[in-house]
Image (spheres, rainbow, N blue to C red):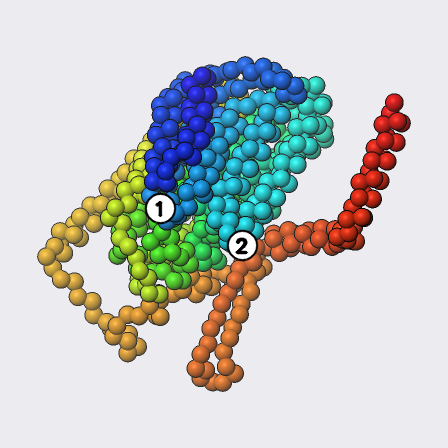
Amino acid sequence: MNYILTGTLLFFTGGIAAVFFNEKTKGAIFLIFSSVAQFLIIPEAFKVLLNGGQLECRLSLSEPVGVSFLRMDPLASVFILISSAGTLLAAVYSIGYMRIYSGKKSELSGYYFFLGLLTAAMLLIVIAQNAILFMVLWEVMSAASFFLVSFENEKKEVKKAAIYYFTAMQVGAAFLIAAFAWTSSASGSLDFSSFGSVLNSSTNISAVLFLLFFIGFGTKAGFVPMHTWLPKAHPAAPTGVSALMSGVMIKTGIYGILRIILLSGPVNPKLAYIIFTVSLATGIIGIANAVSQKDMKKLLAYSSIENIGIIGMGIGLGMIGLAYGNAMIALLGFLGALLHVVNHFTFKSVLFYGTGVVYSKTHTRDIDKLGGLIKFLPGTSFLFLIAAVAISGLPLFSGFVSEFLIYLGIVNGFSVESLSLNIFAVLGISGLAFTGAMALLSFTKLFGIAFLGQPRTELHITREDKDSFLLLPMVFLSIIIILIGLFPYATVYLLENAVKQFLPSNASFMFDQVKMNLQILSGSIIIFGSLILFFYLIRSLLLRKKEVTVFKTWDCGYQEASSRLQYTGSSYAQPFMHLVAELVPQKINLLKEPVLFPKEASLESHAQDFSERFLIQPVIKFVNRFFELFSWIQSGRLQQYIIYGLIFLVFLLIWILGVN
């Protein structure tokens, strides 16, 4: 455990050290500290993950924390690995990306300081075993990410997004504080190991506590309807931070839910169905909103919500398996969920990094203003395409494997003689297939509109010749995406001990069956990929040194392509948006002269988040109206404020005398 703590300290120290160096070397200093930290953290985390067992450290802190333990088990090691590696990759990427903010020395100092603080908090959160220490670290993580989101605080929209994000985090923290306070009071201890006596009970209290924890952690993760902060915070933050928040930070919410499941003992079937249903709704609503977005980062933020829904479906499926005593369903559910945690970290980081490259070269994220980027940014385009195919859940890449495991778990649900489970299995397969189809639509839209065709506006794009710091993290993660996609059975060896924590001790033999099935799947995928490569090589050989001529049989009189003839993001998605109009309301502005052939016309469509429109905004308006009732208190008169102080002192004196 000493290596883990030393590595964590190095991340934090690296952030502090970067403050004292000049603008050009800040990134390099933080990268050096982050690289050294990997040599301490990664081997220890892999050792626990592969061999099982745990590392433990005892802390004696002053009251109210008291004696506390830091404990790394296989589940915690999964999240430590992605947190540590994610920050290292963000550090490499930031050296190249943060050049666009040259001249902002003080802001860059804050960037690296809070990046180190955020990482240290994330690493400690997953090993903390004391309720108060956990909440302190949780708030440090929220505060550090708040300052990173508000990096460009001179922009009004960034400032609003940061405040919205921090407010959402405090709402989630309020539920966690209530849950921890209630559980600690009932168990008589702040240590997580004592919570089982409360959470294991079959009373309604344990169910209420579990839901409080789920809402608190689910707000951080981005479950519907607590998801509305993601599409605001991600576009506002620098791209390195967006990738770290989406790929790693929101997973701390997933970790919290999984940890509470481990502490809860026997699973309540009703709670399992609630988690599965909320997750299914999260996936559908998240990706339905993603389809309608024009801002690349907003689209990716809603896609993160969809993937959190997929992870949640795996968790809910695992809980259902435990509730019905079916270890195979539980195994496939939790294995699919944990693998998708890792997969989402890889391909979503690549997508955000690619978006950052596009923004740094074009200074826009509006896909309707882009086009033809593959001609100017071939490396970025190729890596972005790999991640886009992976997140769409198509074969050959990692996203397919984790979704396949969840599909397989749902199908196994039909083997249980339970009408309710069979109904949920049908809904689960349908919902997961629907989200997969919409994900494919979203990313064919994103890649096709932004990277293919011709530029829709006059863009001054600089090429990526000297962008090794921007491309290197994308290359590394893309290799992992391909390896997991081609050799999925290897991931079972990696995650086996973490999944075993959720299963009965006699379920170990089932992993051999899953490995065998994935080996068959791996062989099929490799054959499929080899056939694609073979036919591509044959085509290349046949067409070598030959000019390909395209004959236009019907072109309506247009002999040359024009960007005005291309799809826009809205027109590409519009047929689908009509199908989900009730789920994703759209505001359409059509401006044209009331004549048969108008000289000028324009159409704009803006999607509205259902949760924000019908849940969040009404609550905000109610709170504003409530506080307006007391606006008379702030009169601006100094005499009145002095009277308030005197009244408070009088009441305080009366209270003290009454107590004594």
Residue 492, position as x, y percentages in the image? 40, 28
Seen in the picture, residue 533 relative to 136 is either above or below; the reply is below
- Residue most toward the left? 545
- Horizontal side of residue 530 vs 113, given as left or right: left
- Residue most toward the front? 639
Q: Which mark is residue 156?
A: 2
Give the residue displayed 67% in from the left and 52% down from the top.
620
- Residue annotated with mark 1: 99
Q: Is residue 40 visible?
A: yes
Query: Are discs 2 and 1 less than 8 Å apart at CB?
Result: no
Of 361 and 335, the residue lying toward us = 361
Of 50 and 542, the residue lying toward us = 50
Of 271 and 102, the residue lying toward us = 102
Q: Is residue 482 visible?
A: no
- Horizontal side of residue 428 vs 642, given as left or right: left
Give the residue displayed 54% in from the left and 50% down from the top.
159
Seen in the picture, residue 133 relative to 212 is either above or below; the reply is above
Residue 257, position as x, y percentages in the image? 57, 32
Q: Which mark is residue 412?
A: none
**Quarter of image, res 477:** top left
Secondary structure under the numbered disc 1 in the rendered image: helix
Residue 144, position as x, y percentages in the image? 52, 37
Check disc 1 and give the amino acid type. Answer: Arg
Q: How many numbered marks does the figure carry? A: 2
Give the residue displayed 37% in from the left and 47% down from the top.
102
Check disc 2 and give the amino acid type. Answer: Lys
Secondary structure under the numbered disc 2 in the rendered image: helix
Residue 222, position as x, y percentages in the image? 55, 42
